[in-house]
Amino acid sequence: MTRRRAALGAAAAALVLTVGGCGGTDGGSGGDGDGGTGGAAGGPLPTGPLERDESAENGPLEVRTEELGAEDVHGFGGGTLHYPARGGSYAVVAAAPGLGADESMVAWYGEVLASHGFVTLTMNTDTVNDSPDQRGAQILDALDHIVEDSAAADRADGRRLGVLGHSMGGGGALAAAHERSAVRAAVALTPYYEGEIEDWSRVEAAALVIGGEGDEIAPVSDHAEPLHDGLDGARERAYLALRGDHFVTNTPSRIVTEQVVGWLQRFLSQPPAGGGESDHRGALCPAPEPDDAEVVESRDSCPHRGAGDD
């Protein structure tokens, strides 16, 4: 392990403990102190996740879950499978946590996405210290498990694959899309990447990158922004900088829910489970504009070229 990764691991572990002690995904404060010096919209940047919005949290479908131990799977550390109880054909998503964390850091994405009609596996990695490239390979193994061997294999559409991750898991999600062109959509949340991939232009998946402007673990200027800019071969791409730190996406705030669910609905061709209020595709274009509350910066490739309407 390099000194840089060792230092990152120590910082990440400390911040994970801080957020956990403050309620984690319940929207309490956490993180690393003052959260930076302010963003483009002015004013101090908050720490921790954005305010939780339970009205934006779940879709209309009943969700079933299956706990998976490492001994139950191949190539990753187990996790939890979340899937719609109602039969049908659903897009597939594997979600990975970051350095020093387990699946609990991405668990709410499993619940939310499954309730909107996605078969989702929130996964543990083989070890909490795995690199982004190792996480990318494990994400692909998790996708294979969902489609071939899971309790939801009968409703998992292997032609519509998506990946999602936080921190090093976000870097891993992009690495997975880099390695497998069948991945159609990728979501990288306050991503961190340090690894073997230098050219991201071969990624074809529609990619959404969300950064925290006050992120001191994975500063957006070093990670989220250059990762987004390097994805010039992606079907579509978008970048959103939110007013917060490394954990700004770790709660179901309205803007995070709408962007992530809408992105996957559109680019995995997953019809909104209940129509109307559960259809978040309209939140993508026009992209959110900077404001004094949540958004510091946004970049997009709108209008999308008919993607996801098939």
Image (cartoon, helix red, strand yellow):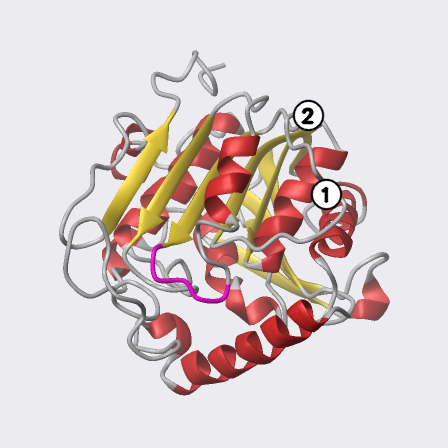
**Alpha-carbon neighbours of circle 1 within 10 Å: few (<14), some, or many (≥20)?**
some
Q: Which residue is mark 1?
A: 153
Name the quadrant containing residue 287.
top left
Query: Where in the figure is residue 21, as x and y percent of width and height?
Result: 42, 87
Q: Residue furthest front?
A: 3
Which quadrant: the N terminus?
bottom right
Q: Residue furthest bottom?
A: 21
**Residue at disc 1, secondary structure:** loop
Q: Main secondary structure of the magenta part?
A: loop
Q: Residue at x 54, y 20 (%)?
A: 235
Query: Which mark is on residue 202?
Result: 2
Which residues fall within the magenta stretch? Answer: 213-217
Disc 2/disc 1 C-alpha distance (Å): 29 Å
Residue at image coords 60%, 64%: 98
Q: Amino acid at mark 2?
A: Arg
Q: Is residue 82 visible?
A: no
